[in-house]
Amino acid sequence: MRPMSAEPTCALVTAMPAQLAEVDRLMRSAFAPYVRRLGRDLAADAYGWFAGAIDQGDLYIALDRGAIVGAIATRRQDADLELALIGVSPARQKSGIASFMIGRVAEIARSR
């Protein structure tokens, strides 16, 4: 069983436009198995809204030694910050990265 805490080398940073394709691939790899079990496929534009989220500063990525291992998208609702979608690389799921990202986004929300 893998440890349930993100490695200390993980950092949460705001995603940049050049990272859009990699974030899209990560989310597809994270969610495609689940969606297929439902008898569906992910639409080609399923994550088309990510470009706008990046432009707004509302998409964050978890980096581990320079590799994107997770992503979390948020939406601003007045004074609140809503978690819209979170995904972790299948190879790194159940290692605490999602919890790490949620904790960091909660800190960001409190600081606003």
Image (cartoon, helix red, strand yellow):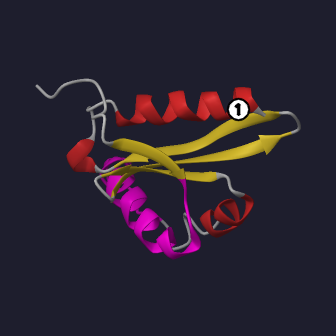
Of helix, strand and loop, which one carries label 1?
A: helix
Residue to which mark 1 is pinned: 109
Residue displayed at 27% across by 39% down: 93
**10 Å crowding of disc 1: few (<14), some (14-19), many (20+):** some
Residue 78 appears at what percent x and percent y? 89, 38
Q: Is residue 24 magenta?
A: yes
The C terminus, quarter of image: top right
Toward which corner of the image does residue 100 lie, by quadrant?
top left
Which residue is depicted at the point 67% across and 59% down? 53
Q: Residue furthest right?
A: 78
* Image-based side of 91 in relation to 81, left or right: left
Q: Nearer the viewer, residue 78 or 62?
A: 62
Relative to 31, 90 lies left or right: left
- Residue displayed at 19% across by 25% down: 3
> Looking at numbered disc 1 in the image, what kind of residue is underneath it?
Ala
Q: Is residue 56 above or below residue 3?
A: below
48 or 64, which is in the foreground? Answer: 64
> Which of 9 and 26 lies nearest the eye of the viewer?
9
The number of callouts visible is 1
Q: Which residues are magenta?
A: 14-42
Q: Quadrant of the N terminus?
A: top left
Residue 56 at x, y percent in the picture: 74, 60
Give coordinates of residue 32: x percent, y percent. Answer: 35, 56
Left or right: 61 as drawn, with respect to 55? left
Most frequent secondary structure within the magenta stretch: helix
Residue at the image point whose x is 33% and y is 30% from the top = 96
The answer to whether 57 appears left or right of 90 in the picture is: right
